[in-house]
Amino acid sequence: MSDVTPLRSAPEPELDDEDLRAADGRVPGRRGRATRQRLLECTREMLTTTSYRDVKVIDIAREAGTSPATFYQYFADVEAAILVLAEEMAQRGEHLTGIITNGTWKGRGAYDTALALVDAFLGFWDEHRAVLRVMDLATDEGDRRFQKIRVHLLNDITNALA
């Protein structure tokens, strides 16, 4: 039996107060953080069924059971919310490098580590497909913010493999 366990989902990223600031600079309380998270989850869900160019603030707010004004307390626009989702996704991708660096790369262990990495990578892709799709499209269109996130995510994996 191998000592490498495939990871199905990454741990939640740890966010500090700076990451959770509202658009006006305030640090939201418990209810505000819950509202912000609900808005992000609704944005993520809408991206799975709708082109990101067709996702509107009013639709996200309605789905989250709140108002567009509340959405704007946390995000400047839909793209800003997607950018937060992309940053969170990239942080969750760090577990892939852990599989590479902590795995055994000799003998039968190498095969098991490779299988664990492929399983984790495919699971990561399935879990974050909608955000990855937007990130790739925005990067291809020249958006440096999304490009920076993609480079960070892929460089860490590439460097670990090297």
Image (tube, rainbow, N blue to C red):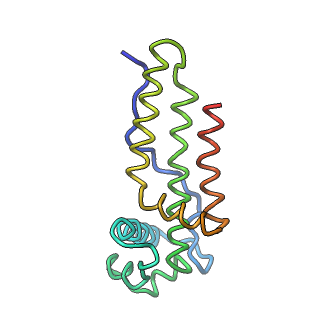
Q: Residue at x 49, y 70 (%)?
A: 29
Q: Is residue 39 above or below residue 85?
A: below
Q: Is residue 162 above or below residue 135?
A: above
Residue 101, horizontal then vertical, whole percent: 58, 28
Q: Residue at x 56, y 75 (%)?
A: 22
Quadrant location of the C terminus in the rendered image? top right
Residue 126, horizontal then vertical, whole percent: 38, 50
Pick whichever, 12 or 149, lies toward us: 149
Q: Is residue 13 above or below residue 32?
A: above
Q: How many marks?
A: 0
Q: Is residue 128 above or below residue 161?
A: below
Residue 155, horizontal then vertical, whole percent: 64, 44
Q: Residue at x 47, y 27 (%)?
A: 114
Q: Residue at x 53, y 74 (%)?
A: 79
The residue sitting at the top extreme is 107
The residue sitting at the front extreme is 140
Quadrant location of the N terminus in the rendered image? top left
Residue 78, horizontal then vertical, whole percent: 49, 77
The quadrant holding residue 18 is bottom right
Pick whichever, 63 or 31, lies toward us: 63
